[in-house]
Amino acid sequence: MRQAGETNSKTGNSLKMVFRNHPENEKIVRTTAAVFASVLDPTLEEISDFKTAVSEAVTNAIIHAYPKTGGDIETYFKREDKKITVTITDYGIGIKDVEKSMQPLYTTLHTQERSGMGFTFMEAFADEVKVKSEPGKGTTVKLIKIIGKEEECGQDL
């Protein structure tokens, strides 16, 4: 029997990545997310949803956090049983109005081809999304995905 605070060695793990805000790094993080979740034997839909949510969060940080300079982005993956938590943190310009920025089609980059759907996709593909931001200090996005949730809900009819 596990003691409080211990995790199963197969399903409990964590990983931290720090990378520059270069667009190519989104692919690396997206692939890492898939591999990190693969231990839990997710369905193709679950892995696709998880990768999409992580990809959107990382892309937002890459594009918006450091508009005039480069900067670091931290991604922390944590797996406990069937729950995967990912936090993506930047130390860039921050978000003035988080609630407004999470509305579909809202974007601050009107000169680029951006749809303003990043947070909407995160909410659609993750089980939980939390955003904390402070202008001038950065933003943290926390995503939670439960693997095997359909099995527990009796979806196998």
Image (cartoon, helix red, strand yellow):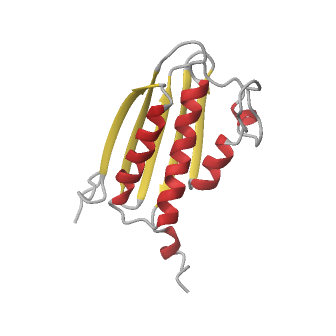
Residues 35 and 102: in front is 35
Which quadrant of the view contains residue 95? top right
- Count the numbered circles shown: 0
Relative side of 101 to 53, left or right: right
In the rendered image, the vertical position of residue 82 relative to residue 88, given as above or below: below
Which quarter shows the C terminus?
Answer: bottom right
Q: Which residue is pictured at 55% across the width and 19% down the height?
A: 92
Q: Which residue is pictured at 57% across the width and 51% down the height?
A: 128
Please provide percent x and percent y for residue 116.
72, 37
Relative side of 118 to 29, left or right: right
Residues 116 and 145: in front is 116
In the rendered image, the vertical position of residue 72 relative to residue 98, given as above or below: above
Relative side of 138 to 79, left or right: right
Please provide percent x and percent y for residue 76.
40, 38
Q: Which residue is pictured at 48% across the width and 75% down the height?
A: 151
Which quadrant of the view contains residue 127? bottom right
In the rendered image, the vertical position of residue 110 relative to residue 148, given as above or below: above
Please provide percent x and percent y for residue 48.
51, 57
Which quadrant of the view contains residue 106? top right
In the rendered image, the vertical position of residue 131 relative to residue 68, given as above or below: below
Please provide percent x and percent y for residue 33.
41, 48
Please, which residue is most extreme toward the top here? 68
Which quarter shows the N terminus?
Answer: bottom left
Q: Which residue is pictured at 70% across the width and 34% down the height?
A: 114
